[in-house]
Amino acid sequence: MRNGIVGAATAMFLVGTLAGVSGLIDSYPVYGGQALRYFVAAIILLVVTRVLGLRFVRPTAREALCLGGLALLGLVVFNVCVIESTRASGPALVGTVLGTVPLALALAGGRPAPRVLAGACVVVAGATLATGLGSGNATSLLWALGALVGEVSFSLLAIPLLPRLGAIRTSAYSTTLAVPMLAAIGLATEGTGILRTPTPAEAFGLAYLAIVVTVVAFFLWYKSLPRLGPGRAGLFAGLIPVAAIVTGAVLGVAMPSAYDLLGAGLVVAGILVGLSRRNPAAGTVVSPSEV
């Protein structure tokens, strides 16, 4: 369980650091950049699969549906909804809605232990405070709710896949499937300008998203998810806004306010509450493959 805690915390913290590099790719075609990100990540993951000697596992019909749903909802729909919600009213509202992921995963995982549920509520309160109690319009809210569905699907649809495919193959297959989907959306919305040669700063930003936020974070999350179960693992989603605050402070982009620090403290307290008592049923959801 300790390895699961470290992995889940690291994965969500790394996802939160994307806020610090997002400014580097503001001028790059949005959907083309996402397609390129997942393309690079898929290549890396497939190479790692080959180097480790992991044989290709043909998904069953049920696994193929889960993989398709994971790529469509957890990667493509999630990214589209976050992008469009941000365009409609800024990042605060979607950040606040995504702050409810710990509670959503705790409830979706079945009957959560009281401490897990209480911890999830505290984490949600802290994440909401850390994202600034975002305000927006109805359009932005609908997109944000779609992003919430995508984020929850990213974990729940992976659970049936991990016993046989493992973390690396699940990550590799889902990112590969996401590339043509995002490319199609990019062609429809951005036309022939979907891709261009990135500047050095943009290349660094895209590489960071592909390697750190996708390859490393996906692998750590999918290794930790079966060990903790969705309820306990979901607590660590509250670290995303905390990581954004820390990254902004380290880079000198924005210093945290008292509300930011209070929100971060609540997130940590909620995680400790949720993990304070082990529930065997929640910690042994699936038996993961070797990787």
Image: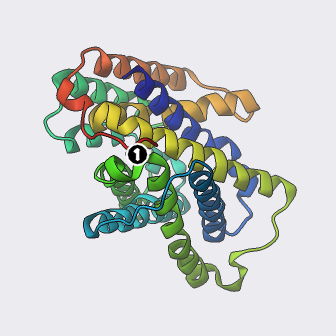
Residue at 43 percent of width and 38 percent of height: 223
In the rendered image, the vertical position of residue 69 relative to residue 204, given as above or below = below
- Colour mode of the rendering: rainbow
Residue at 50 percent of width and 24 percent of height: 259
Residue carrying label 1: 98
Residue at 59 percent of width and 36 percent of height: 244
Instruction: Examine the image and state in which quarter residue 221 appears.
Output: top left
In the rendered image, the vertical position of residue 191 relative to residue 93, given as above or below = below
Q: Position of residue 44 (x, y in %)?
A: 64, 55
Q: Position of residue 175 (x, y in %)?
A: 52, 61
Residue at 72 percent of width and 74 percent of height: 195
* Viewer-side residue, 31 vs 96: 31
Q: Position of residue 101 (x, y in %)?
A: 35, 42
* Viewer-side residue, 156 vs 125: 156
Answer yes or no: is residue 100 visible: no
Mark 1 lies on a secondary structure that is helix
Q: Residues within 10 Å of mark 1 (few under 14, many from 20)?
A: many
* Viewer-side residue, 267 vs 285: 285
In the orientation shown, which residue stands out farthest toward the left?
A: 111
Q: Quadrant for the N terminus, please.
A: top left
In the rendered image, the vertical position of residue 2 relative to residue 289, given as above or below = above
Answer yes or no: is residue 110 visible: yes
In the orientation shown, which residue stands out farthest toward the top?
A: 276
In the rendered image, the vertical position of residue 164 relative to residue 231, given as above or below = below
* Viewer-side residue, 76 vs 162: 162
Disc tally is 1
Amino acid, disc 1 = Leu
Q: Position of residue 149 (x, y in %)?
A: 33, 56
